Amino acid sequence: MSKCRKLITTTALMGVIGVLPAFADTLGLGRLALPEEIAAWDVAVMPDGRGLPEGAGNVFDGEDLWIDYCAVCHGDFAEGAGVWPPIVGGRGTLTADRPLKTVESYWPYLSTVWDYVNRSMPFGAAQTLETDEVYAITAYILYSAGLVDDDYELTHENFTENRLPNEGGFYFDDRAEVEFPIFTQEPCMSDCGAPVSISARATTLNVTPDFPIIRNLYTEDLIGNGAADAAAEEVIEDASAQPEAEAGEAETQMASLDPELVAAGEAAWRQCRTCHQIGDGARNGTGPQLNDIVGKMAAQVDGFRYSPAFVDAGESGVIWDEATLDAFLENPAGMIPRNRMSFRGVRSADERAALIAYMKSYTN
C-alpha cells in the first residue's frame, strides 16, 4: 500500500492567525473579526467529526441528487466522464505507473469527502447544497465505492463509523525530523563512497533476453530460438486446430439471431456502455465485460470484483439465460437485492429482447 504524509497545516495556520491582530494594531489597519464572522467561515470538518452539522441523507436520495448535480462531470456511477475524474475505483493502483486516486483508493477520511462536497460542489454553484443533501451525496459515494448497502443512511451520529480503505496508507509528516537533517549537512566533496568497478557483464551473466517467437509472413517458418521452435509450433497448431463441431455450433447460433434485433440491441447498448464493454478487446471497468455472458453462471467474469449480492447469486446457481437476463434488465435491484448496479432497469420488453440478442451475438 502506498504511504502518504499527512500535512500538519492546522497548527501552522493557527500560528499565523495568532500574530495577525498584533500586525493590525501596529499598522493601524482593520479590526478583530467578530465571533459570528469567524463562525461563518469556519466550516472545516475534522476526521473525528468535529465541525459536522446535524443532518442525515440516504443512498436513494443521494442517487437522485447525484444525477442532478454531479453525473454530468463524474458519470452516473461516479466512474468519471470525459476529462472529469472518477470518484470511485482504483483500488490497488497507487503503486502503478498511472495511479487512480479516488475516494475508494486514496482519500483517507470521509470527513474530507463531506467537507469538499459542502465547500466546493457542485461545480459553478458551490455551497448551494443543503446540509442533508451533502449527507445524501456522501452516502451515494460510499455506496458507489461498495462500502455501504443501498438502504444506508449517513448521519452526523454514525459518520465516524465509516472508514475509507486507504486510511492506513497515510502517516504524519516527519520530514523535519527525518529528512531535513540529512539534506542540511555539509556536502561531501571527496572520497564520499566506495570505488565503483565493473564486476560482471550481461553476456557473461546470460541475462540478454531471447528473441520472441514469430512466424515469417512469407515462408510460414518460425523465427526465434531453435530450442523453443518445436514447442511454439505445437502451441500454434493447437490454437489453430479448433474442433469442427464447435465452429459449426457457433455458426448455427449466429444464423438463428435476427440481424435487425441485434442491430436494435447495439443501438440500445448506449445505456450500458458507460459501465460495460463487449466485443473485441472488451475489458472490465466499472462493470464486468460481457462477452460470453449468455448461458453462464452469475459473477464468473475473471478479474472483476463483484459485490457480495452478485457473489451470493452465483453461488446459489443463478444462470444468465434469456429469462433471467430479461428479469434482471427489467429490475436489477428487484431480482438481486442490494447489488451495487445503480441502474433503474429497461422498461420496454422489446428493448430488453434486443439487448439480449446483442449479447448473444458475442457469446460462443
Image (spheres, grey):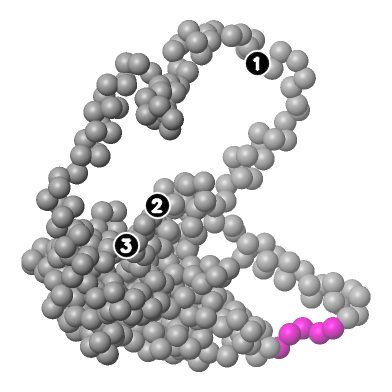
Quadrant for the C terminus in the image: bottom left
The spot of residue 191 in percent (x, y) is 71, 13
The spot of residue 138 in percent (x, y) is 43, 78
Q: Which residue is mark 3?
A: 289
The answer for how far apart the CA atoms under marks 2 and 3 are is 20 Å
The local crowd at label 1, few if under 14, some if 14 to 19, many if 20 or more residues have their Cα within 10 Å, is few
| Amino acid type, label 2 | Gly
Disc 2 is placed on an element classified as loop
Q: Which of pointers 1 and 2 indicates the residue nearer the eye?
A: 2
Q: Which mark is residue 137?
A: none
Residue 337 visible, this orientation: no
The answer for how far apart the CA atoms under marks 3 and 1 are is 54 Å
Say whether disc 2 or disc 3 marks the residue closer to the N-terminus: 2
| Amino acid type, label 1 | Gly
Q: Which residue is mark 1?
A: 193
Say whether disc 3 or disc 1 marks the residue closer to the N-terminus: 1
Residue 97 visible, this orientation: yes
Which residue occupies the foreground of this view, 112 or 255?
A: 255
Q: Residue at coordinates 34% horizontally, 76% vertically from top-left?
A: 263
Q: Which of pointers 3 and 1 indicates the residue nearer the eye?
A: 3
Q: Magenta segment range?
A: 30-35
Q: Are marks 2 and 3 in contact (CB under 8 Å)?
A: no
